Amino acid sequence: MLTVNDSFPGPEIHVQKGDTVFVNVHNQGKYGVTIHWHGVKQPRNPWSDGPENVTQCPIPAGTNFTQEINFSSEEGTLWWHAHSDWSRATVHGAIIIYPKNGTTYPYTEPYEEETIVLASWYKADVMEVITDALTTGADPNVSDAFTINGEPGDLYDCSNETTYRLAVEYGKTYLLRVINAILNEETFFGIAEHNLTLVGTDGAYVRPATVDYIVIAPGQTMDVLVTANQAPSYYYIAGSPFADSIAPFDNTTTTAIFEYKGNYTPPSTIPFPVLPLYNDSDAAATFTNKIRALNSAEHPVNVPKNITRQIYMTVSTNTLPCPNNSCSGNSNGDRLSASLNNISFDTPSISILQAYYWNLSKDVYTTDFPEKPPTFFDFTGNVDNITLYTNPGTKVIMLDFNETVEIVFQGTNLSAAENHPMHLHGFSFYLVGKNKGNFDNATDPLKYNLIDPPEVNTIGLPKNGWAAIRFYADNPGVWFMHCHLERHASWGMDTVLIVKNGGTEATSIRPPPSYMPPCSKS
């Protein structure tokens, strides 16, 4: 397995709000790799953002690349991960962003802090898993386990001697920084007989919400407080999948132990948290509907009100035909695919950012990504008469600097409908509305939350539903947008937003660094 500094998960990066960090990535693996700083806006500096062949080409094996990480308004927990093929399965770690000197958390300071990284475990070479799937056109094999801080836990027969244990003192409150680095499954997470209080998500504070469990999608981070206020004993921490789809998924549960310090007899049976069933969409919605921005004087919201650009975007799983019906995606010999507005993203062989900056775009991408579905139908109803075939292309969305943008993601019932964690690079955005069914442009905007919507970088698009986000296009550059379920991203559920320069040096993309990894397929 490919790891950073011999650790899984990888090393944590600790910064203060507004810092600039330089990371020299030495690739000692066997193939090209890139690193993305998930949720870091990187103002005017897409050169270090990391998605493969979008803002850079892979760092070739045996070489290194120094990336400049520019923190701005982020505060809380984010993370870094590989952004090439499926390397992020094992190449990832936490980013902890502390308040600036002279400021503090907008909640009672915890006794201690602990990072909880949820991840996937394969009894195989993960690169072979996705390479084989893309070669045959079939669904990739699911993972064999999930892990908490690198350990699968007691419910698997391979690891209970090394299950992760979080030692706590009675009466103390702990801040858990929870990161979902899992490849293809969203997660229900909880601690037996202990409430969790959500205080932050995706590097921003939220109004405290006390819950029995959280739902966290791949790409998301959540800060939760837990008080050790039960009888001193052992209590299971558990993460189980949320997968409301007919698509295959890893239906196993990872565990750790919330272990009180002191002298007592360990329980013969460790209490287990009550988590929702794997397909309980209503339980997931009940949790996500509680998330509101803190919206205080120190941490205000600034929701765009007057929208100048509205984009309506279907999110679908699809198929593509294969020569001589030679693929294994379905009984027709097609390959599995995915799309946004029926365009399946075709990753170019050179970086879109470099093509844009050096005016080479005509050979790399086109600017005609459709801003509404090319065909309207009952997206979330009976789709038996709607073709599953999609169209490959490298099409981007061009935005003027400082436009006020609304994107409405619309889930569809094509193929295998499910909840999609949609992620946008280069921005935090406001989730102003979501619901089941088809979006109604006349009535649904009337119900938007424009007062205290959460400011996030990844949202769960409900199965057969819609979600509306808003942001200011105030960060010039080339920014990837994609589903954070890795198999969907690999199939083309992606696009690129290019924000044009604003006319001054301070509102324009910075010049490239003196060295960028070379753009030859690796």
Image: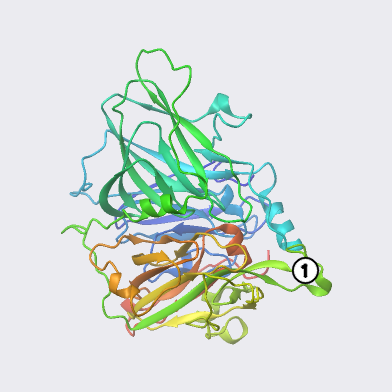
Q: Compare residues 59 and 196 and report the one nearer the observer.
A: 196
Residue 203, image x, y percentages? 34, 55
- Residue at position x 23%, y 39% in the image: 109
Classify residue 158 as left or right of residue 396. right
Q: Compare residues 100 and 231 and report the one nearer the observer.
A: 231
- Residue at position x 39%, y 42% in the image: 213
Residue 86, image x, y percentages? 61, 55
| The furthest residue to the left | 297
Q: Which of the image's four quarters has the N terminus?
A: top right
Q: Mark 1 = which residue?
A: 332
Residue 510 in view, yes or no: no
Classify residue 131 as left or right of residue 89. right
Residue 31, image x, y percentages? 67, 56
Q: Which of the image's four quarters has the C terminus?
A: bottom right
Q: Compare residues 44 and 64 and report the one nearer the observer.
A: 44
Residue 32 in view, yes or no: yes
Residue 257, image x, y percentages? 45, 28
